[in-house]
Image: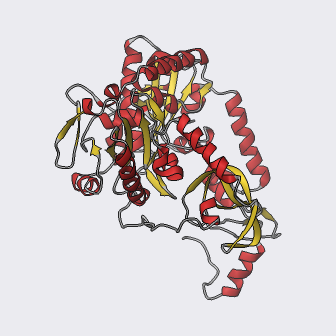
């Protein structure tokens, strides 16, 4: 740090400042007038992050001035004002050519925020490249501009070399400005600018990820075009079969423990759970023993049931080790069908269970929650079965006390309430429909825990040493794309 500091030995002084400014989290940046002691802001971290040196002297007046400037810029937005600066009126191609921004006037322009080597962005830009080429082929006036968030030029050059479109030069400060200007919240993000230079949509990435390559038919994603896409997706879902999900060309099999190929045709007519998971994912490792237990219970009563493991592991040894703990089938690690299935069911986090019924139709996209709440009784994971289970719980609830005290929450009585999905504060598993709850403390117990009908089972902490790969963050009982 190139600035001054309160000595570490001055604990009284440091604690006094913490108390004076009510610091509850770090980093925390308070900005004052050194002459008068007036506090300009306690939101210095936010202002520095968003506006950088432009925010100086960080007074409320200066921040309001910057916000007014941004509002005026959006009201009078042009493609030049979005992409250009006072010293640069061009973009670059991956061949090093300078392309005047004026050549984009009158076109639809997609601003694609990119980070080299970040899995979700790499997957998205690969699909976008095919859509881009198709729109060019059919004569649409469409261009894409990469907005790099890479910190070094080599990483940018490596990823940009695979992109057929233009880019803002790497390191240009306008990239940071555009993050704030379009209120970037997640990656991938593709902002769509209309032919008049005005913003049509701050992120069409979700639309592209949902429909894949076929989304080009809905360009430029007007409400009318999106309705057509939705109808096509609905018709496609209605014609879905297990074969259409798991067969692609010569890939018409899944594998067993010893690598034996099991024809997909052997699974037709069964209820099949697609199990998206990975060994590196702590929540997946923690969930696996429960899934194995419930799988075995279901198989004892229903032979028309199977699970197919769809791995997000990074290497064959991890896949083999994790799969060895599973009594079901799998797709091979390096299998093109995995990407299609993740896109089809919009898998954002793992572990995830999608239930496919005997006809090949999707009966549940969140069979994991049903399994965690109801166990093997959730089979076959249909809405009808869930309604039956809820009716059974309602009948049982008639015999439960309306209020009770519990050793884990002696402060207040717990009241029996109808609830949606919740987490039990004793066994830490999911619950639904009924809970013994304290609204004041946001405390819930399963009726079975509150009434001590069952002992808490063994749990696995899921905190083994493996780390999530780039692009994922693990929190609670799920690992999601960051």
Do we see residue 30 in this rendering? yes
Q: Nearer the viewer, residue 194 or 61?
A: 194
Which residue appears farthest toward the top when viewing the image? 139
Give how far across and how far down residue 430 sits, in percent. Answer: 56, 55
Residue at (48% x, 21% y) in the render: 233
In the figure, residue 284 lies in which quadrant? bottom left
Do we see residue 481 in this rendering? no
Give how far across and how far down residue 308 sits, in percent. Answer: 32, 42
Position above or below: 156 against 241: below
Give how far across and how far down residue 88 sits, in percent. Answer: 51, 34
In the figure, residue 44 lies in which quadrant? bottom right
Position above or below: 376 against 231: below
- Position of 407 with respect to 248 (left or right) is right
Q: Nearer the viewer, residue 249 or 166?
A: 249
Number of disc labels: 0
Q: Nearer the viewer, residue 117 or 171?
A: 117
Residue at (65% x, 27% y) in the render: 77
- Position of 335 with respect to 27 (left or right) is left
Position above or below: 207 against 260: above
Colour scheme shown: secondary structure
Position above or below: 221 against 414: above
Quarter containing the N terminus: bottom right
Q: Nearer the viewer, residue 19 or 67?
A: 19
Give how far across and how far down residue 98 sits, in percent. Answer: 40, 29
């Amino acid at each position: 740090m190139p600035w001054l500091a309160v000595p570490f030995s001055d604990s009284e002084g440091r604690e006094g400042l913490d108390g004076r400014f009510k610091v509850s989290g770090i980093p925390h940046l308070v900005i004052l007038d050194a002459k008068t002691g007036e506090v300009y802001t306690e939101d210095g971290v936010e202002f520095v992050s968003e506006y950088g040196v432009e925010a100086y002297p960080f007074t409320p007046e200066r921040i309001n001035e910057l916000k007014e400037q941004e509002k005026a810029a959006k009201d009078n937005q042009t493609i030049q004002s979005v992409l250009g600066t006072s010293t640069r009126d061009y973009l670059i191609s991956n061949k090093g050519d300078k392309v005047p921004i004026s050549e984009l006037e009158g076109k639809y322009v997609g601003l694609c925020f990119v980070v080299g080597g970040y899995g979700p962005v790499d997957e998205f830009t690969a699909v976008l490249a095919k859509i881009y080429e198709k729109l060019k082929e059919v004569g649409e006036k469409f261009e894409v501009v990469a907005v790099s968030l890479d910190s070094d030029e080599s990483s940018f050059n490596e990823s940009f070399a695979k992109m057929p479109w233009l880019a803002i030069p790497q390191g240009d400060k306008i990239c940071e400005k555009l993050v704030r200007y379009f209120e970037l919240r997640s990656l991938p993000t593709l902002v769509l600018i209309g032919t008049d230079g005005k913003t049509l949509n701050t992120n069409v990435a979700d639309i592209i990820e949902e429909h894949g390559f076929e989304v080009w038919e809905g360009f430029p994603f007007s409400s009318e075009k999106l309705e057509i896409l939705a109808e096509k997706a609905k018709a496609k879902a209605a014609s879905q079969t297990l074969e259409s999900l798991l067969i692609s060309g010569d890939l018409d099999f899944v594998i067993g423990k010893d690598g034996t190929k099991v024809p997909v045709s052997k699974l037709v007519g069964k209820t099949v759970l697609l199990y998206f998971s990975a060994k590196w994912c702590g929540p997946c490792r923690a969930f696996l023993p429960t899934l194995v237990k419930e799988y075995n219970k279901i198989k004892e009563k229903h032979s028309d049931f199977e699970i197919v493991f769809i791995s997000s592991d990074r290497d064959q040894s991890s896949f083999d080790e994790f799969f060895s703990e599973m009594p079901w089938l799998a797709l091979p690690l390096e299998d093109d069908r995995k990407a299609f299935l993740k896109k089809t069911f919009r898998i954002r986090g793992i572990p995830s269970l999608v239930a496919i019924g005997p006809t090949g139709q999707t009966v549940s996209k969140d069979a994991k929650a049903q399994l965690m709440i109801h166990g093997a009784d959730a089979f076959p994971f249909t809405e009808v079965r869930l309604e039956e289970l809820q009716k059974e719980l309602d009948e049982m609830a008639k015999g439960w006390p309306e209020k009770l005290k519990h050793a884990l929450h002696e402060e207040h009585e717990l009241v029996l309430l109808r609830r949606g999905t919740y987490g039990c504060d004793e066994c830490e598993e999911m619950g639904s429909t009924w809970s013994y709850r304290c609204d004041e403390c946001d405390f819930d117990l399963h009726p079975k825990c509150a009434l001590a009908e069952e002992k808490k089972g063994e749990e696995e902490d899921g905190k083994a040493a493996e780390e999530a790969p780039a692009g994922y963050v693990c929190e609670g009982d799920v690992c999601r794309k960051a």
